[in-house]
Image: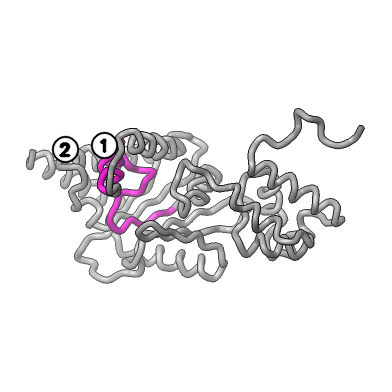
Amino acid sequence: MGGRGESEVPQSPREFYGEELRRRREAAGLTQNDLGEQVICSGSLIAHFEAGRRKPQLDVARRLDEALVTDGFFVRGRRTLDTARFADHFAQAAEMEPQAMAISEYAALLVPGLLQTEAYARAVFWAYQTNPVVEDIDKRVVNRLQRAQILRNENGPIFWAILSEAVIRTVTGGSAVMAGQLRHIEALGRSGRIRLQVLPFTVGAHATMNSMLKLMRFTDAPDVAYVEGLYSGSLLDDPLVVQRCKDAYDLARAAALPPEASLDLLRSVAEEYDNER
């Protein structure tokens, strides 16, 4: 008999979703590029959906249902694709990080998750919880540190971070934790694995001051931007909006201290924290 053998049945909700998309696309006699044109995305992005590597945005899922006449199947199916490793509003952005060829972040108040030490991450999660549970905090810290492994991979993304001076001056977890955190970032910067700049208070108003911002660039999929607030976040993929976010980031980068001066500042502030101890 034809068809998929039992051993070939998709093993995860995302694989199942992708396989259904492939099956229904082929039944409609469409190539990936054909379907991409109908739902206003690239054929390569359709390939990512079908391989289970990307989760379609809600508006794309709606257009998939319209193009393939699937009565809301792909909109409803998105609910099964969320992962419990991360907060719902951040899950898709987190899953995109290992696929990105370049990540650029602006941090307004907190060290970006990919740069956090274990002690700093623990202090952040502890502060977030109304009724902290040690086991839950441990799990969140492990997930955050696992995300950071992409910076250890020589084939990992190019990473550029701009930190508001508030990030390095806000004492999170105590002076010892802050000193260790800043030295960790400095070491990554000195190694050449990341590029880092600090945007000092003296700059005053600047283009990204209203929000944290993460930009991700891919080799064969559209760029995206991610912004986040308290218990909420938005993944932005409208090309015009993403371009405006890029422009804002470029303005902030131009206003920030050069990388070498930024690393020197991190070392100096880390020494201040040491002296406080």
In the image, 14 versus 275, the foreground residue is 14
The N terminus is located in which quarter?
A: top right
Q: Which amino acid does label 1 sit on?
A: Ala
Q: What element carries label 2?
A: helix
What's the amino acid at mark 2? Ala
Q: Disc 1 vs disc 2: which is toward the camera?
A: 1
Q: Name the residue under label 2.
A: 176
Q: Which of marks 1 and 2 is nearer the N terminus?
A: 1
Q: Position of residue 139 (x, y in %)?
A: 38, 35
On the rendered structure, is 218 left or right of 63?
Answer: left
Q: Is residue 141 left or right of residue 102?
A: left
Residue occupying the point 51% across, 63% down: 236
Question: Disc 1 and disc 2: Cα gap in Å?
Answer: 9 Å
Query: Residue lying farthest front?
Result: 131
Q: Which mark is residue 119?
A: 1
Residue 169 drawn at (x, y percent):
18, 52
